[in-house]
Amino acid sequence: MTYETINERNLSAGVGELLLYTADIVPSFIPLTLFSFFIIISMGSYFSKIRLTGSGNFPASLAVASYLTTILAFSLSLIDGLMNITTLVICVTISGFSTLLLLFTKDKN
Amino acid sequence: MANFRNLIVSILLTGLFFVAIISFGAQLASNNNANSSILDSPVINSTYGNISSDLSSSDSQVQTQKNATEIDPGQTGDTLSIPSIWTSILSIGGLVTGLFNAMFGLLFVIGISPIVLAVFGAIVGISIIFWGWSMIRRGT
């Protein structure tokens, strides 16, 4: 199996072309990028709050991370062919669940 | 007595958030002439429409109730506001079921088996019933 090389792409078209090339070679590139972003933001927010105030608020960290991931997913979806609708729907679903978790937990700190 | 005010506000806020984030995505795609949009998903499209109409219905019912109470607080407090309260509860109930339908519809889209979703839905439904019962019993 031969892979397409990056030289076959028109890289002067912008950084979107570079992302498209990577996503074509590795289809799970964008979902994994979004998942990494989500984990980094949620864990970073949770543990930084523990360090600053002594107690963490996991639902709030989860909600913040899911909102930011959804905004990033919406931005990436503007590039044609980079992301499919299912990935976008998963991001919106996670945002909805995290909102439910945030609003229905007793810890409002 | 159970504190239903926070519960209703939380449900309405969740619905508003859902509508806001889908509107943001659709508007962003429209403004930038994107070929695909979040509204291309049939589940998201129908969910967006249902939740929007439920929120509009809740808004009009609550506004009607507020106006009736302001005109004659004594009379409406005893009699006339009861149908209005009931329709508000029905409207908010529609919003809750719409949200749950949306969640399960989205899970179906990402490829989870309908049998697994049905079992999960039954567990969640029974849990909500017992949660509501315990909330009324304990008053919190």
Image (tube, coloured by chain):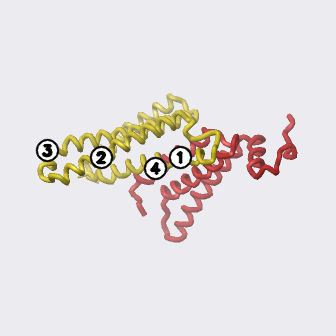
> Hue of chain A?
red
Dot 1 and dot 4 residues touching (CB under 8 Å): no
Which numbered mark, 2 or 4, is in the foreground of this view? 4
Which numbered mark, 1 or 4, is in the foreground of this view? 4
Label 2 crowd bin: few (<14), some (14–19), many (20+), radius 10 Å: few
**Marks 3 and 2 belong to one chain:** yes
Q: Is residue A52 above or below residue A76?
A: below
Mark 2: which amino acid?
Ser
The chain containing the residue under callout 4 comes to: B
Q: Is residue A63 left or right of residue A41?
A: left
Q: Is residue B67 above or below residue B119?
A: below
Q: Residue at x 53, y 37 (%)?
A: B107
| The disc label shown at residue B17, or none | 4
Mark 3: which amino acid?
Thr
Mark 4 residue element: helix
Tell me where residue B135 appears, x and y as whole percent. Answer: 29, 48
**Marks 1 and 4 belong to one chain:** no
Mark 3 residue element: helix
Mark 1 residue element: helix
**Marks 1 and 2 belong to one chain:** no
In the rendered image, which residue does mark 2 sit on? B134
Front residue (pair A90, B81): B81
Tell me where residue B117 appears, x and y as whole percent. Answer: 49, 33
Find the distance from the CA under tag 1 to the CA under tag 4. 13 Å
Label 1 crowd bin: few (<14), some (14–19), many (20+), radius 10 Å: some
| The disc label shown at residue A94, or none | 1
Find the distance from the CA under tag 1 to the CA under tag 3. 43 Å
Chain in yellow (letter) = B
| The disc label shown at residue B79, or none | 3
Q: Earlier in the sequence, mark 3 or mark 2?
A: 3
Find the distance from the CA under tag 2 to the CA under tag 4. 28 Å
Q: Earlier in the sequence, mark 2 or mark 4?
A: 4
